[in-house]
Image (cartoon, rainbow, N blue to C red):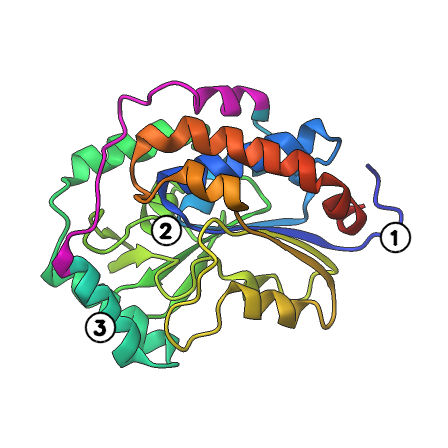
Amino acid sequence: MYNEKHETRAVVLGGGGVTGIAWEIGMLTGLLHAGINLADADAIIGTSAGSFVGAALACQYDLTKLYESQLVPNTAEVNVSTDILTKFLWIRAVLLGGSNPKKIGKMFGDIAKKHPSKVTQEIRQSVVKSRLVTTEWPSNLNVTAINAATGDLHILNKDSGISLLEAVSASGAVPGIWPFISFGGQDWIDGGMVSSTNAHLASGFNKVIVLSPMPKRHGFVPGVKNDVAELQKSAKASLIIPDGNSIVAMGKNRYDPSYAPSSVKAGYEQAIQEASSIREIWE
């Protein structure tokens, strides 16, 4: 739909593992079938799982086809999970980092290096390639990643001088789960380790839709609900999180690909139910 007021619009897609990918795909497909095309956004901001989905949305990929791909097993996917030590180290980083995002990010970077994933780079790259529907940078796509050495959050895009494959690999490099990624002389980890969604990056846009598969706040850094509340002070912003049915459908292990079919179906059904309220903001 033509935006007569020329108001700037952004879509924010948060992290949430392989089930988060499926849920977001279900949501976007359901909204499209309800007549709401979020691919029209001026900016698409993807973190971790959201970087893969964001790439598909930004390149105008056929969402119905993408939806259908989630209903069959992806043989390249690997069923991974967090062990007790990894969970402890994550909690420790969040608690000791307090309200300092850079400190938390750096501690997660240390975890990635001192307690590396058992998954090889070759296997990880196979997983990443299987999830991407394009290797070309869409002009409106922005992907987040954290510098493992400094803890700084970075926005990667077509002008960053790296490939889309490298960017999404970094954005989804969960410490202890997936191996960290190196490029530009730096090591990089998951962009969602401090904030699962990074909705604050949509500041300055007039209309913002945020999909957050994992909205729970960790520690003392503002969570997605805080970010959206702040956005709403100067913009029309809506936060969509998994409803009860979606939470059940996504399972307890967000990295288990066997839950992708139920997750994408639940996301679709939720989108149909929430389409009217989202349309009010988007159009």
Q: Is residue 73 magenta?
A: yes
Is 264 placed above or below 175 here?
A: above
Quickly name the residue at label 3: 92
Q: Which mark is residue 5?
A: 1
Q: Amino acid at mark 1?
A: Lys
Mark whose residue sits in front, 3 or 1 = 3
Q: Which mark is residue 186?
A: none
Question: Circles 3 and 1: CB distance less than 8 Å?
Answer: no
User: Which picture quadrant has residue 196?
Assistant: bottom left
Q: Which residues are magenta?
A: 64-85
129, 254: nearer the viewer: 254
37, 222: nearer the viewer: 222
Residue 187 in picture, x, y percent from top left: 24, 58
Q: Secondary structure at mark 3?
A: helix
Quickly name the residue at label 2: 171
Q: Secondary structure at mark 2?
A: helix
How far apart, in angstroms, are the residues tagged by discs 2 and 3?
A: 22 Å
For residue 18, say whether it is visible. yes
Is 272 placed above or below 48 here?
A: above
Residue 238 in picture, x, y percent from top left: 67, 56
Question: Circles 2 and 3: CB distance less than 8 Å?
Answer: no
Question: Looking at the image, which residue is at 32% across and 35% down?
Answer: 128
